[in-house]
């Protein structure tokens, strides 16, 4: 049994029963929820997770611009993204576009390095170098409520118009549902300053221009039904997304405007069920999913190369997992401790149309088998797992791999859980994507999987005070060493710079340190402050080619592209409870990305300057009987810094957003 409160702090609901697994993660992840989630509600998911330590975002600019996520420099394809417990896939290029998922409909985001170190999960959860979990909002009701309705409207810079709605309904004591929809339209136009200097420091370009072809029009609809059964639960989720967007392109060769377009249509339906037997000692879960993705890319510019490609992806996924508590003496004599075992099996089929003439359809069958055991005694928890991966592509050789992981955590002080130590080791691989293997003029069907080996050690300390001004303090630090073998890279094919070949040439070593802090202050009955920050140091070196060691332009030992040595973020929310039915929040956030290079050749010509942004928002909320109203004014990039995340993709300067919301 646990008490839950509605996201609006002015309302409290009765105690409700939540049925879930007893198997908790051995090593905790980084989480955004509560006030932090509310402060970032108007950002994209990719923008929100920039406030996690160890995360790098490649942002190509604009409202609808592509944003890829990379953790600890291992590459975007090594991050598994899970939406309500089931992985989002993209067999074509391996990248999940987080811009398609609304923060309005999320209540928690959690990032785990290595994996979510829990025994009771699908085999897919063991199969990535890092995992990001998006948990959508669950319907919660007062005793006499049957419906919750929420409307939100946004408008702002770049011609932004956004409207979203949510309807939650309680069909019975055990069955609830939610239906959400969102519409976004924006021109994506913004002014920017374009300045370039040569290696002598002389200004070659310094002008202002308007970013064009960054428009987007998108619609999203999600439906969710959940229910409780005896010692279990079930849910079904359906998702649809449709968009048309311009691709603003890079500013090179004095070309300031591009005409490429992209259309996306995504649909999936997924179901999860879970049940416990034998007074909770035995648990099982079952997942099933079907997904269809259609993408059309158009380049009408015949001076480059006319392209009009359409790709259709299909995915079928089935998973089963079982968890059994062998013995549990933690609450009694503590002599044997607690020992759990788990087994999970996943099957996934992927198909893709439109890759090659003469071979217009490619498919992949993936079978994953995972076994895990946890042992907890005194103040120590241990998890060991092994996963077997069996992959069959109809055009390439079969791939069979067995990969292990070990996680350990402990609280060294008896009777005090404030201080925690942990460490883990994990080895895993990722298969080449369909684009890597089969794309015209680039694919290489003989590619081998890309492997990562991770070593991690960390400690955290947290404490709560009931009567002091400082109510909560949490400090966390981690050190890690990662190796990426058989890294898949693109190399020129022949003498043409327009034809490339994918090859296993890369080897990267990553050494890093992360520092995190969270605090909660209560200045008076009405005033409180939540503040936290992260700092990351990373040395990510490219050791792919020992012969490429020219000190003037070589890549051997160089920091890999776009990975800064130093990065940091901070976020704070100052809350003022004006009266019992009114409140105001002032939110501040800061992002810093240090110096880096846009290739592994760390020379002056490839140098990228540091950048930072400050964002502010002010939110006012009031409750009038059963109606909750809020208004928010947001200013992003307060000091109007001109910067690029990716070379020649200028980012917006100062911009504004206004949001009004009504919930009843």
Image (cartoon, grey):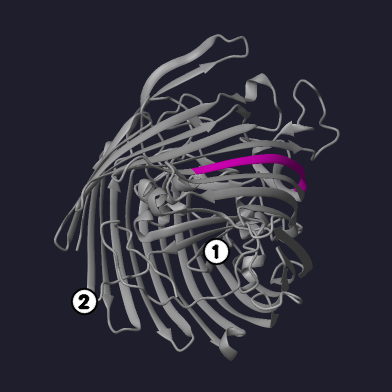
Q: Which residue is mark 2?
A: 144
Q: Residues within 10 Å of mark 2 (few under 14, many from 20)?
A: few
Q: Position of residue 532 (x, y in %)?
A: 48, 41
Residue drawn at x 51%, y 25% is 253
Q: Position of residue 568 (x, y in %)?
A: 55, 35
Q: Which mark is residue 89?
A: 1
Whichever of callouts 2 and 1 sits on the residue coming sooner in the sequence is: 1
Q: Say above or below: 572 vs 630.
A: above
Q: Residues within 10 Å of mark 1 (few under 14, many from 20)?
A: some
Residue drawn at x 70%, y 26% is 602
Q: Residue furthest right?
A: 547
Q: Position of residue 393 (x, y in %)?
A: 69, 70
Magenta range:
504-518
- Residue 381's quadrant in the figure? bottom right
Q: Nearer the viewer, mark 2 or mark 1?
A: 2
- Residue 653's quadrant in the figure? top left
Q: Say above or below: 428 vs 390.
A: above
* For the residues bearing labels 2 and 1, Cβ distance under 8 angstroms: no
Q: Is residue 54 something one can see in this rendering? A: yes
Q: Residue furthest front?
A: 467
């Amino acid at each position: 049994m646990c008490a839950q409160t509605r996201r609006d702090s002015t309302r409290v609901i009765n105690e409700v029963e939540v049925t879930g697994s007893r198997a908790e993660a051995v090593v905790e992840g980084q989480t955004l929820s509560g006030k932090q989630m509310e402060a970032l509600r108007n950002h994209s998911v990719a923008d929100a997770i920039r406030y996690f330590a160890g995360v790098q975002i490649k942002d190509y600019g604009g409202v609808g611009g592509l944003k890829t996520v990379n953790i600890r420099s291992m590459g975007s394809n090594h991050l598994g993204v899970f939406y309500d417990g089931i992985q989002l896939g993209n067999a074509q290029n391996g990248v999940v576009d987080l811009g398609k998922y609304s923060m309005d409909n999320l209540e928690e985001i959690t990032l785990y390095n290595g994996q979510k170190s829990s025994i009771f999960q699908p085999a897919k959860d063991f199969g990535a170098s890092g995992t990001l979990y998006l948990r959508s909002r669950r319907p919660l009701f007062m005793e006499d409520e049957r419906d919750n309705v929420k409307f939100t409207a946004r408008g702002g810079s770049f011609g932004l118009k956004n409207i979203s709605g949510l309807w939650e309904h309680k069909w019975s004591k055990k069955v609830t549902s939610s239906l959400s929809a969102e519409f976004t339209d924006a021109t994506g136009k913004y002014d920017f300053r374009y300045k370039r200097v040569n290696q002598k420091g002389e200004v070659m370009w310094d002008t202002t221009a308007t970013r064009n072809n960054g428009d987007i029009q998108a619609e999203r609809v999600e439906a969710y039904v959940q229910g409780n059964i005896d010692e279990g639960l079930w849910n079904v989720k359906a998702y649809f997304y449709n968009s048309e967007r311009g691709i603003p392109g890079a500013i090179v060769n004095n070309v300031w405007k591009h005409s490429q377009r992209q259309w996306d249509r995504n649909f999936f339906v997924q179901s999860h069920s879970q049940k416990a037997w034998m007074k909770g000692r035995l648990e099982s879960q079952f997942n099933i999913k079907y997904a269809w993705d259609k993408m059309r890319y158009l380049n009408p510019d015949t001076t480059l190369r006319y392209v009009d490609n359409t790709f259709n992806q299909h995915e079928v996924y089935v998973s089963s997992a079982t968890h059994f508590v062998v013995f549990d003496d933690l609450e009694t004599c503590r002599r044997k401790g607690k020992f759990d075992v788990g087994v999970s099996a996943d099957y996934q089929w992927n198909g893709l149309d439109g890759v090659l003439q003469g071979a217009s359809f490619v498919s992949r069958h993936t079978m994953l088998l995972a076994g895990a055991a946890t042992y907890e005694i005194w103040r120590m928890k241990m998890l060991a797992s092994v996963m077997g991966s069996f992959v069959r592509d109809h055009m390439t050789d079969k791939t069979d791999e067995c990969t292990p992981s070990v996680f350990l955590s402990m609280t060294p002080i008896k009777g005090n859980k404030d201080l925690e130590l942990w460490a883990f080791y994990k080895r895993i691989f990722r298969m080449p994507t369909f684009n890597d293997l089969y794309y015209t003029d680039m694919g290489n069907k003989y590619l081998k999987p890309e492997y990562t080996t991770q070593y991690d050690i960390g400690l955290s300390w947290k404490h709560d005070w009931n009567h002091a001004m400082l109510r909560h303090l949490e400090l966390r630090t981690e050190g890690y060493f990662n190796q990426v073998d058989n890294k898949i890279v693109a190399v020129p094919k022949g003498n043409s710079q327009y034809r490339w070949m994918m090859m296993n040439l890369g080897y990267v070593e990553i050494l890093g340190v992360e520092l995190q802090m969270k605090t909660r202050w209560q200045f008076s009955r009405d005033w409180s402050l939540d503040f936290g920050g992260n700092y990351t140091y990373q040395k990510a070196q490219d050791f792919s080619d020992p012969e490429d060691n020219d000190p003037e332009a070589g890549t051997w030992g160089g920091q890999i592209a776009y990975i800064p040595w130093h990065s940091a973020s901070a976020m704070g929310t100052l809350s003022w409870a004006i009266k019992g039915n009114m409140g105001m929040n002032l939110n501040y956030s800061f992002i810093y990305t240090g110096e880096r290079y846009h290739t592994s050749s760390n020379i002056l010509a490839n140098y990228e300057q540091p950048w930072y942004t400050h964002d502010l928002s002010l939110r006012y909320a009031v409750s009038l009987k059963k109606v909750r109203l809020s208004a928010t004014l947001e200013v992003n990039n307060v000091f109007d810094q001109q910067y690029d995340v990716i070379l020649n993709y200028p980012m917006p300067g100062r911009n504004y957003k206004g949001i009004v919301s009504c919930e009843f």
